[in-house]
Image (cartoon, rainbow, N blue to C red):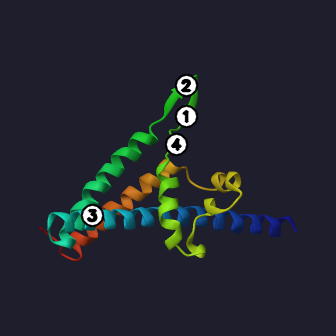
Amino acid sequence: MTHQIREQLGRLRQRSQVAVTLDALRYGLRLLVVFVVISAVATVAIGGRILVGIKWGLFLLGWATFGYSAFLLRAQTDDSTVVRSRNRLGQVLDRVTNPFVPKSLRSEDDSEDQDSAHTSQFPDDIKLFISSLVILGASFVLEKVFYVTG
């Protein structure tokens, strides 16, 4: 009996780890879409080729996000307590993109019980770091797979 309970607990932990990871990837993909739109609008505004502008925009914004998230991830000691900087970008991103995201794909923090949702998710600074890797990966794919150069 206890063996079955342990198996069920193990499966539950694996599911929750997968859900947390998928939440971080959804965050990264939503930020990627926002950065693609920003890059496309900026490229059209200056009269450039759209795919080249998106690639360069993702490259620059990806490195900027990487640097900012690395800055947020540094540990600050305050009376031997590790304090993490909190990121408000996630809240703004949720407000902007939620009307366009189906309910089945929304992150857990859209629910009413935000305290339990935040304990089962990565902190915003880690999600931002993962997002920077997704954005830089998309820029790399545009250049190396689709041969967008310029």
Contact between marks 1 and 2 (CB within 8 A): the answer is yes
Closest to the observer: 29 or 53? 53
Question: Which amino acid type is marked by label 3?
Answer: Ser
Contact between marks 4 and 3 (CB within 8 A): the answer is no
Q: Which residue is mark 3?
A: 39
Q: For marks 1 and 2, give the CA distance.
A: 7 Å
Q: Secondary structure at mark 4?
A: loop
Q: Which residue is mark 2?
A: 78
Question: Which amino acid type is marked by label 4?
Answer: Arg
User: Which label number is shown at residue 101?
Assistant: none
Q: Residue furthest toward the right?
A: 1
Q: Where, quadrant-wise, is the C terminus in this rendering? A: bottom left
Could you tell whether 59 is left or right of 48 in the image?
right
Contact between marks 2 and 4 (CB within 8 A): the answer is no
Q: For marks 4 and 3, give the CA distance.
A: 26 Å
Q: For marks 2 and 4, give the CA distance.
A: 15 Å
Q: Residue furthest toward the left?
A: 150
User: Which label number is shown at residue 83?
Assistant: 1
- Circle nearer the N terminus (3, 2): 3
